[in-house]
Image (cartoon, coloured by chain):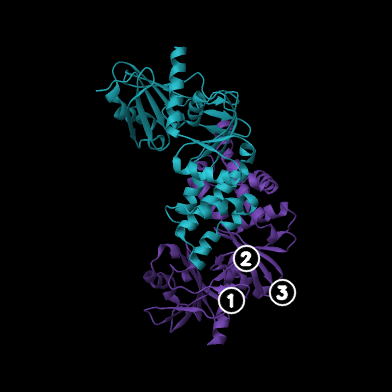
Chain colours: A cyan, B purple
Amino acid sequence: MTKADWIAVDWGTSSLRAWAMSADGKVLGEARSDKGMGKLKPDEFEAALLELAEQWLGTTTTIIACGMVGAKQGWVEAAYRSVPGTPLGQPMTRAAAYDNRLNVQIIPGLKQIKPADVMRGEETQIAGFLHVEPKFDGVLCLPGTHTKWVHISAGEVVSFQTVMTGEMFALLAGQSVLRHSVAVDGLDENALSQAVSDTLARPETVGARMFSIRAEGLLTGLSPVVARSRLSGMLIGAELAATRPFWLGREVVLIGDGKLSRIYKLALGLQGVEARIADGTDVTLNGLRAAYAMQRVMN
Amino acid sequence: MTKADWIAVDWGTSSLRAWAMSADGKVLGEARSDKGMGKLKPDEFEAALLELAEQWLGTTTTIIACGMVGAKQGWVEAAYRSVPGTPLGQPMTRAAAYDNRLNVQIIPGLKQIKPADVMRGEETQIAGFLHVEPKFDGVLCLPGTHTKWVHISAGEVVSFQTVMTGEMFALLAGQSVLRHSVAVDGLDENALSQAVSDTLARPETVGARMFSIRAEGLLTGLSPVVARSRLSGMLIGAELAATRPFWLGREVVLIGDGKLSRIYKLALGLQGVEARIADGTDVTLNGLRAAYAMQRVMN
C-alpha cells in the first residue's frame, strides 16, 4: 500500500477530495466522496476523512485541508484572515481527532469588511495560481455556485467580490416557473451571446426580460436549449454589469470547471477581454502544497 | 341549505376559492381549499370543485372560473386572447364534467406577443377594477409571485409586463445560501427603503450586493429582519428599475394582498409616486360578476 508523507484535502460544501502526497509534492494517490460539509455534523468529519485517507496513513500524518470544512458549520471554525493581504498565512486551525495519526490543519478563509464578503477554499486556489505566477497583476475570476472576482496585485488579494450567479441559475432553471421552458442541458452560443450583450447594454431591464423565457415557451415554442442559454446569458450579463470595475481593461484569468469557464470566457470576449483559463485542480493542489510548505517552516 | 344562482371561482396555482352567488351578484356563501392547479391532474379538477361547491348546487348551475385552471396543465386549456384589447371577452371555454349539474366556463387569459408575456387570472381582476372605474387611464400593478404591471387606457389593456420578484424572493430567502442570514418574517422599513433607493440608483450592481447579506450576517451579525428587508428592497428596487416606463409619471393602483401591496406602495412613494391600493378580493369578484353578465348576454 502507498503511504503518504502528507495528505492534501479540498473539502467543499458538496464534495470531499483527498490526495496522498510525497514529501516533495508529488501526487501518490487520489480519492473522493460526496461527503461534503453540507452533509456532515461536526463529529462526522473524522470518519468521512478516514474513509478516504486511512489507506495512506503510517505514523502521524499532516493533513492540509481547505474549503468549507473550516466554516462555522464545519469540522472546526478556522477564523477568516483579512484582505488586503496574502491569500495564505498563519495560523492554520487544528481540528481535534480521536485517531492520533491525524494532524489535521485547516486553512483559514478570507474576509473583506467593506463591502462585506467572504471566501473559503478560493484563497488556496489563488495561492496556487500565484505560486506559479508570483508577478501576476490583474484579476482572477473563479466561476462556480458563488463566483469570486479577485483583484490581485504585488502577491496580495487587494479586494474581492462574490456574485451568486451559479446558485441563481440553478434555482431559476430547476425550481422556478422557468423550469417548464428550460432544458436541463445544452448550449446555444448565439442565444447566450445575444443575452449577455442585451443585458450588458441595459442591465436594469433584466428583471423584466426573465419571464419572457417562459412566455415565449408558451406562445412561440421557444427551444428549451435556447431558453437555457438565454437565462444563462442574462445572469452572466448581469454579473458582468455588476463586476465591470474588476474586468474592464484588466488581465483576467478564469479558474475552475472547464464548461463554466468557457462560458465566462465567451461572455468576456464579447466585451473585448481575452481571458485565459487555468486548471482548477492544478491551482488547488499547488495552493495546498504552498500551505504545507509554510506549515513545515513554521513548526 | 343555500342554493346558488351561479358560482364564482378563483382557481390559482396554489389555491381554490369559490363563492355562491345570487342572480343579482350578492355573495351567499364562500369556501376555499388548497387544491390549486399545481396539485391536480386534469381529471381531478371536478372532484376538487365539487368538494367545495356541491352544497350550493340545485339544478344545472353556471360556474365562472378564472386563473390557472385554464392553463395547458389545468382542467382544460382556455386559449389566450391578445392585447391590446379588453380584459374580458368571448369565448369562454367549457370544461367537461361528469356531473351534469356543472356548467363550468373558464375565462381566457391574455397574451402579448412582443415582448412575449402572458397572464391568467389577473385579466379578471383588471376587468373588476374597470367595472368600478371604467374611465381609468393609468397603470395597475398586481403584486404577487409573478407581479404584473398593466397599462390601461380607454377600457383596454394596452400592454403588460410580468416580473418574477415574488418567486425570486421566495427562492433566495428560502433556499439559497442567504437563508442562513434571512428571517422568515418581519419588516424593517428603513432597511427596505435604503435597499430600494440604492438599487434604483445603481440597478446594475444588484448582483454584486446580494451576497453581502450573507457576508454581513457572518462578519457583523446583521439582524435577520434587516437582512430580509434588504433582500426584499433589492428585488423590488430591481423591479422598479425594470418597469420605470410603466410607473414614471403615471397614476398607479396596486391590487392584491395587503402586506405586499403596502411594501410596493412604500417603494413607489420613495420615487414620488403616490399609489392607491384596491382590495384584491373585491376586484376578483367584480371581474367574475362582469364575466357572468357577459356570458348571460351571449347565451
Residue at 73 percent of width and 53 percent of height: B271
The residue beneath circle 2 is B160
Residue at 54 percent of width and 71 percent of height: B109
User: Which amino acid does the dot numbered 1 rest on?
Assistant: Leu
The residue beneath circle 1 is B88
User: Which amino acid does the dot numbered 3 rest on?
Assistant: Lys
Rendered-image quadrant of the N terminus of chain B = bottom left
For the question of whether residue B31 can be seen, the reply is yes
Looking at this view, name the residue that lies furthest to the left.
A1
The percent position of residue A140, horizontal first and vertical second, equals 55, 33
The percent position of residue A47, horizontal first and vertical second, equals 32, 29
Label ID, residue B145 = none
Q: CA distance from mark 1 to mark 2?
A: 15 Å
Parent chain of label 3: B
**N-term mark: 1 or 2:** 1
Q: Is residue A120 left or right of residue B267?
A: left
A47 is higher (above) or lower (below) than B276? above
The residue beneath circle 3 is B135
Residue A59 found in image quarter: top left
